[in-house]
Image (cartoon, helix red, strand yellow):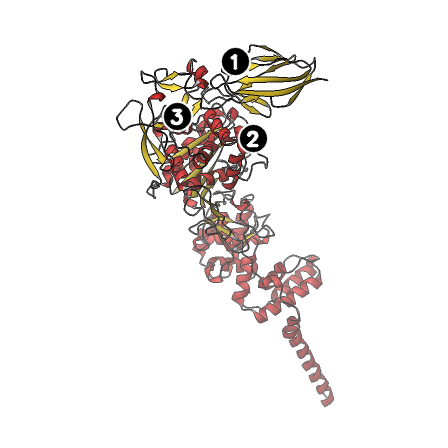
Amino acid sequence: MKPHHRKILLRLLLGTTALAFAAWYLLPLTFPIPQDLTNTQKSPILLDRHGEPLHHLTLPDFTRSQPVPLAEIPDELIACTLAAEDKRFYSHSGIDLLATARAAKDRIQNGRTISGASTITQQLVKITSPKSPRTLKTKLREALTARHLELTWSKDQILEAYLNRLDYGHNRLGPSEAARYYFQKPLADLSLAESALLAGLPQSPSRLNPTRHPDRALIRRDTVLTRLADAGNYDASSISAAKAEPLQLRPLKKDSTAPWLASFPDLRPSTSDLQTSLDASLQRQIESIVTEELAPLANKNLHHAAVVVVHNPSGEILALVSSGNWHDPRGGQINGALTPRSPGSALKPFTYLLSFEKSGRFPGSIIADIPTRFRTREGLDLPENFDRHFRGPVTIRQALACSLNVPAMRELNDLGGPEPLHTFLQQLGISTLDPDPIPYGLGLTLGNAPVTLLELTNAYATLARSGHFQSPTLIPHPSTSISHRCFSSTAAFLISDILSDPAARAPAFGRHGPLELPFRCAAKTGTSSDFRDNWCLGYTPEFTVGVWAGNFDNSPMKGTTGVDGAGPIFHRSMRLLHRGTPPTWFEKPSTLTEIPIDPRTGKSVVTTPTRHRSLELCPTTSLPLPASKTDYSPSGLALLDQSYSEWLTSSYNQRRDEYALTPEHPAITPLRILAPRPDATYILDPELPNGGHLHLATNLPGLAKWHSKTLALTPGDQEPIATLTLGTHTLTATDPRSGETIPITLKVESR
């Protein structure tokens, strides 16, 4: 060969070598590594207060991923993955030239693609790059990007990134999530057979889904094991034992503990884990209690229950049960703790608390439990107690402990109507009330305004904190916690003392029921009209527990009250809480003293033992009047004013040996006209069913005397009926005890 020919050949060789070098080492560097490769995403985990995982949340693409270092991935799983996907991973440089040549040969011979040649590095580039058509250009770009990756990353870095991004089906990325989902075990506990099964899934996660197609998954597993045997790293006996191992899946139940947690409105987790205030062990035990207590009540049409447990000192929610059965098709995924429902009598304590705060009343103060008509927007309301009996004069302790309706309404009426209680409940964090309190009327104290269990439980927790309000939270030590004082510790102690008094509760609820615990505990029930909701809420200084029971379709239960439905759940939950925490009780404020009173009159008496004498707590600044001889008849009966006349002679009176009536005794309440309203206008219409008759009413039925110069009055059941005629008329009601006269004017017009 001539010299100049050798020079040309040498130049060609050098040029080709330079081009090959550039193509192999320099050109790949012009292809950027996918951005997703440098952003390893981890699914946030909601943890309990002790760090136990409760919920593995999804990423924005609805996948779950928990990346782990390569050192934590078992060697067997790595070996199986390499055997299944890229047996020459540690010997090639990102592109497997032998596999590429084989794949090209197979395509030429068969006219179609028989096998792939993508390396793990190429696959990693593919799954971290934006989706694009599978053209030759795309594959060439991925190959050159893989070379870039091989030039800048170590093999272990590449393998770790690849394994943590593999799709193992069911939206589980990475081996850690796969092992947790399919076997509920950590990676370190995987057997060789389980490692081979997982290694085979990424080829086609849907087609090889072991929960739906176990036969296909096993065939793929055995193929991976065969390839592993061919690699010569495992002896035949190990491979045979792995192939003989039966498939033992333990598919993860979706969010079995606190399934409501991920959708709770106050949780806004980022990409990092978030610790909640829940106690996972306590949560599971409370869930079990609800399930066990609901089961025997199904025949009473009670299917759902919700529970809230609050740690009083911190305001943290320790447990929350949303429905009792998350999978119930009748609304099991409704969160009963956040759903407004009628609380029944559970609001009564706050009426009496207001009375202690604003009216100088104390637990021994007397309220009349007698038939009483109240004016409402819809007309006159004649409320009844739950048992449809009236007890006459009762103390506030008796009225609240026995959950009497009429005394609660009378007390709220004396406080000025629904407005004070409406404002007070809002201060306690009740956010579900309508802005206008007037439509609720005095029924607000009986629970005609829907509230949520979470907010009402926290209102009771405010009682347990001696009047200090703290917003409930699922996140320990929140920076946005709201805190303020709502009422005095003196009033709080008095309410707690009444609600923890089993003797005072006994006439209505008996003894040794669900409300009575082995330790002192305040408790109150509530039952809405028609038995659609029942409640039980209570507290010790350490914990507050609130329970709602009912049906989300609003169907009524069969005669189930708060004692029967919510009560047993409350009882068991409170006992569970105090297994490891000794119960305490509140220290009596120095502002209270214990005095002897006559519970018939509410007045203080001398300390000489007597049949009608009891000890009662009272603020030292508002002691009751002492009893005098004028309070009693010569035979020792307590004297009542004329407003009790109807009750005293009725069948409701079971205390005839305690009371007598005296016309000289001053009235407990002044005369008020309930109907008609002042300056009301009535329309005479022959089609109206009342035929132009107007029923007159006062708060003293049977006592007040009515008169009119222009309207005819005829006797009614308790008060007269006026026959309406056209014109302007004046009616007068007179209180015969004092001679007080109240005139009222009305107009009658024709249609």
Alpha-carbon neighbours of circle 3 within 10 Å: few (<14), some, or many (≥20)?
A: some
Q: Position of residue 346 (x, y in %)?
A: 47, 32
Q: Which circle marks residue 440 in the picture?
A: 2
- Secondary structure state at the residue bearing disc 2: helix
Instruction: Give the image location of residue 645, x and y in percent.
Output: 44, 15
- How crowded pointer 1 is (Cα within 10 Å; few <14, some 14-19, many 20+) is rated as some
Instruction: Report the number of numbered marks.
Output: 3
Q: 148 above or below 531?
A: below
Give the camera-side residue of 129 and 90.
Answer: 129
CA gap, disc 2 to disc 1? 27 Å
**In this view, the mark in front (3 or 1):** 1
For the residues marked 3 and 1, what is the alpha-carbon distance in whole angstroms? 33 Å
Closer to the camera, 21 or 518?
518
Quarter of image, res 676: top right
The dot on residue 718 is 1
Residue topped by disc 3: 509
Between discs 3 and 2, the one toward the N terminus: 2
Q: Amino acid at mark 3?
A: Phe
Which quadrant does the C terminus fall into?
top right
Please tell me whether mark 3 or mark 2 is closer to you in this view.
2
Relative to 198, 573 lies left or right? left
Q: Quadrant of residue 555?
A: top right
Q: Amino acid at mark 1?
A: Gln
Q: Residue furthest left?
A: 608
Task: Determine the secondary structure under disc 1.
Answer: loop
Badge 2 amino acid: Tyr
The single residue placed furthest to the bottom in the displayed view is: 3
Q: Residues within 10 Å of mark 2 (few under 14, many from 20)?
A: many
